[in-house]
Image (cartoon, coloured by chain):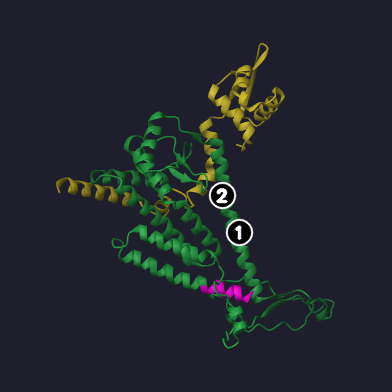
Amino acid sequence: MADLLLGLGGLTLSGSLVIWCLALISRSSRSQFGARWRCLAWLLLCLRLAVPLSFFPLNQMGREQPLVQLPAPSDTVIYQHRPGPAPQTPVSSEDADGAGQPSGSQPLPLPPVEQLKPTAPVQSAEEDADFSLSLSQAAVLAWLGGAAIFVLWTLAAHLRFLAYLRRWAIPVSDPQTVAVYNQLGDRLGLDRRPRLMVCPGLRAPMLAGLFRPVLLLPREGLDGTALNYSILHELTHFRRRDIWLKTLALWVNAVHWFNPFVWYMVRLVERDTELACDEGALRQLPQEEHAAYGRTILDAVERLKG
Amino acid sequence: MKRLPDTELEVMKALWASGPDTPRAVLERDLEAFGWAANTINTYLTRLADKGFVSVRREGRGNLYTPLIAQEDYQTFDSRAVLSRLYGTPRNFVAALARDGLERRDLEDLRALLDELEGGARRG
């Protein structure tokens, strides 16, 4: 338990440092390092952060080579079920801090030590002390619980969205739109293409789905060049496999839900995938169309703000 | 308004497509692809009438069905939870920008900047 926590704590701390560095680099020299390269850096970082296990099991190394002594902090029992006025297990703050708690700022939902009135029937402490919870066990439970809630919440939202698509999205039948779509797919050299559907209620085009991606267009408000640029943008997302990076970032967010740096990273990943996608889309367009493309993006932002 | 199950929604879609006073025979023809028995369709129509989605008018030997709730209204209702959450998740086109609190004034500034850049490109 404590080893797992130490691994996770070390990973999340070093991850925070890398996130902070990458955020600084992107802030200070946005022009020098394109969003494409930042996305690659996020991908590598997310791949490492996604697995909260140490690649070099510290405790095993310690056992096999007794010369390497790792100062493992002692694990404090923080809760024992004792329904009597028995003396509480002392929890010194030093021990609690040393027991693999990574950030110190992270509040732990510690179960309160039960306090009963002295009038309660006194039982011997040994009889009921079979349930105990060490600090590291409590921390692991809290971590798993938070991650599970995050995953279930995200999954529920996604399933609800899929149900909505099943009910309302219909394949695009307008021949002009289909022609534009096929043209752009050819231009980007895509052998596999997402299905093209129109979905009422959407305010801007979007790409959805990991395994069977679908490009969704709003029912109204897009024609001519705006339609062209929107489809180009979404197909560029598809070609760059941005949904995979975003999904990976969400998984990292679930594993490191207690780390605000990771929440910040997810927003930077969103931003950088959009910027990298725009960079890629603009490379497909002649210089004189760049401003018009930019206007299409701004219009979409405005529609999303409603 | 109540959320409809998929089956009742399909009946509603057929009614929205055919408009007011749809005769029963037309409705059954439109729903042929689902392979529902007449009794099944009856059940759905009764439920829809109970929920206030459909009005039934008896004329001659058959019934005429009219949707009471517009497709737009129901679809907006159906999307409210889904799409508001959606724009809060990172799956969307430029949602990240929209969420980062880009003000309307910023949008105007950015548009002006684009115009300026475009003018410069033409001159240059």
* Left or right of A218 on screen, residue A50: right
Which is nearer the eye, B34 or A157? Answer: B34
Q: Residue at x 63, y 70 (%)?
A: A140
Q: Which mark is residue A288?
A: none
Above or below A173: residue A251 = below
Viewer can see residue A280: yes
Q: Residues within 10 Å of mark 1 (few under 14, many from 20)?
A: few
Q: Do discs 2 and 1 share a chain?
A: yes
Residue at the outermost top position: B60
Specify whether residue A17 is painted magenta: no
Residue B4: x %, y % from top left: 62, 36
Chain A pictured colour: green
Q: Label 2: which residue?
A: A157
Residue B102: x %, y % from top left: 37, 53
Residue B81: x %, y % from top left: 55, 45
Quadrant in the picture for residue A106: bottom right
Range of magenta residues? A1-10
Chain B pictured colour: yellow
The amino acid sitting under disc 1 is Ile
Residue A138: x %, y % from top left: 65, 72
Secondary structure that dominates the magenta span: helix
Above or below A100: residue A42 = above
Which is nearer the eye, A55 or A18? Answer: A55
The amino acid sitting under disc 2 is Ala
